Image: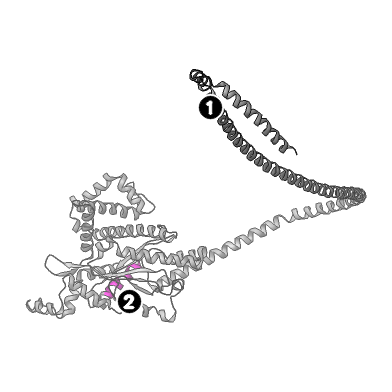
Amino acid sequence: MGAITNSNGFFTTGKDDGKNHIERHNYENGNEQKYRKYDPKNVSEVIELSDTKLEDDTRSLAYKKAYELGMKTEEEWSVANSKRSAKRQDKDYSEYVSKTATSLVNQLKKRTAKKTDDNYKADKYLQQTNAIRSNGGLAIYGSLYYISNAEDYDAILDEKGASGLTAYREFERDTLTTFHQSALYQHLHGNTEVRAEIHTAEDGSQHLQTSEMLGEINGRGAFRIAPVSVKARKLVELYESLYPGSGQAHFESDIALEKIAMDSSKKRNETTGGFNVYSEGAVINVKRQHPDKIENVRKSLFDDADFNKNPRKGDLVKRLFRRVENRELEKIAITKAKEHGVSWSRSYGRSDGVYRGKAEYKAKRKALELEREYKAKHSLLERRESVLDERLTSADELTKQAEEERRSAENMANNNVLRSRELDHREKEQQKQKQHNDNILIRIKERERAVSLRESALDSRQAGFKKEKEEINNQFAERENRLNTREKNIDKIIENKVSEKNIYFEKVQKRLNRAIDIIINTIPNERLRQRFSAYIYGEDTSKINELATKSVKTYEKTVNQIVDDDLEP
């Protein structure tokens, strides 16, 4: 859902801006609050986006902006007017201000007086003329930007509920605010904007409302309202910033594309020159696929003629200006929709891009509601007629079906008697089977009890075995401890005996040595004594060792006998 509406004109008087807007729509009395109840409490009825306050007067702001753009103040006018000839002097300052929009007012009067079947357009031209007159002759240009309508709100309420509409309206405000702050918008409106604000409390959808002063100094040095000239100049400047050195060429090419689109859209059911262009996507496709066609139209507008004298210049410039704005607004809306988690896509044909007054808008809303109500009732009647037709058509079938059901019931009754007998027999068989099953269950339970008792006995026996095993293990442990202790004692005894053996061996060896020394000393012959000594202490000592070993073995035999006696249990 989503339809961009970009409506413009010299309707601004300041009576529908800021504080005046709140008072005019009687917000204090609760009127036109149908959709505002879905907004948070901190959202104002009027959100100022420009550097203005609710109490500011739009007309005063517009005069200030006109002075910045070159219109003379009353003091400056008085000095300049006194220097002019009497015939050329203005009667008063109001006449001077009115002359700034003379060309515009004459065009509006001419269009108003033109015979046409479109009374709507004639009324709009007259409204603009009256607005300029109420401003003391100063023409203030106003714009309205919508990205949705009330029908979208109602659809969201049906589908998403109150919370869905709350999120959607927040998305709208964020989108319109971002669009106003965008570099493109500021480039096109920055030095001409008078006021910008979002109106949230409306019978329809909320929107961005702006006012600006589209005036410039003409070739004669006079300040004049010139919306087409100002917009064309701003577009060329924008293109030059985007395509340095070729801004004018891109401007001319897009103007030619707008002419193709305008010629095509005037004949919606026909095709002009092989093209039928409406949507932004269709325009882009023509631009990519048919550059030759665009170049031929561009030459006819700019090279072969003076574009400034073209009677369709105003329409073409305004169309291109609106397309550039709407393209940026659509891009921002798509991005913001993703950020806010809402569904929005631009659709064509749901809005003619024209703003309508309060009474006219309500009348249209009422007509749409009546049309929907009529369609709903008509659809309901059609469904009811269809149901009646189906009932009448199926009446005979229902009668036949009833007869068949009666016969079926009789057959069922006969069958029920047979089934009853069969059921009695089955019931007796089931009782027998049940008795048999009960007996089996009893035997199973008895076996379970026997098994349970046997398991208890086995558990008790297993516990006794376990206890007996523990006692045996304890006995083995005690015996092992005694053996370990005895082994340690025997090792100590052996160690002591070995030590005693060594000591005894040394003593025996010493005694033998002393005995040999005594024997040697008793030999009177020195020569015999030396030979005996060499025999005893020389290289062959086996005899002494043999004697000592025999003595030690005798000792060991005695010790081993003692040890064996100790090892007896």
Range of residues picked out in magenta: 118-131
Whether residue 117 is visible, yes or no, is no
Residue tagged by mark 1?
A: 517
Q: Main secondary structure of the magenta part?
A: helix
| Amino acid on which disc 1 is placed | Asp
> Where 319 falls versus 550 (above or below)?
below
Number of the front mark, 1 or 2: 1
Whether residue 299 is visible, yes or no, is yes
Where residue 274 appears, x then y in whole percent? 34, 46
Where residue 120 appears, x then y in whole percent? 35, 68
435 relative to 249 in the view: left or right:
right
Residue tagged by mark 2?
A: 18
> Where 241 falls versus 531 (above or below)?
below
Asked whether 508 or 184 is in front, the reply is: 508
- Residue closest to the far front: 524
Q: Quadrant of the C terminus?
A: top right
Label 1 packing within 10 angstroms: few (<14), some (14-19), many (20+): few
Q: Quadrant of the N terminus?
A: bottom left
SS at mark 1 in the image: helix
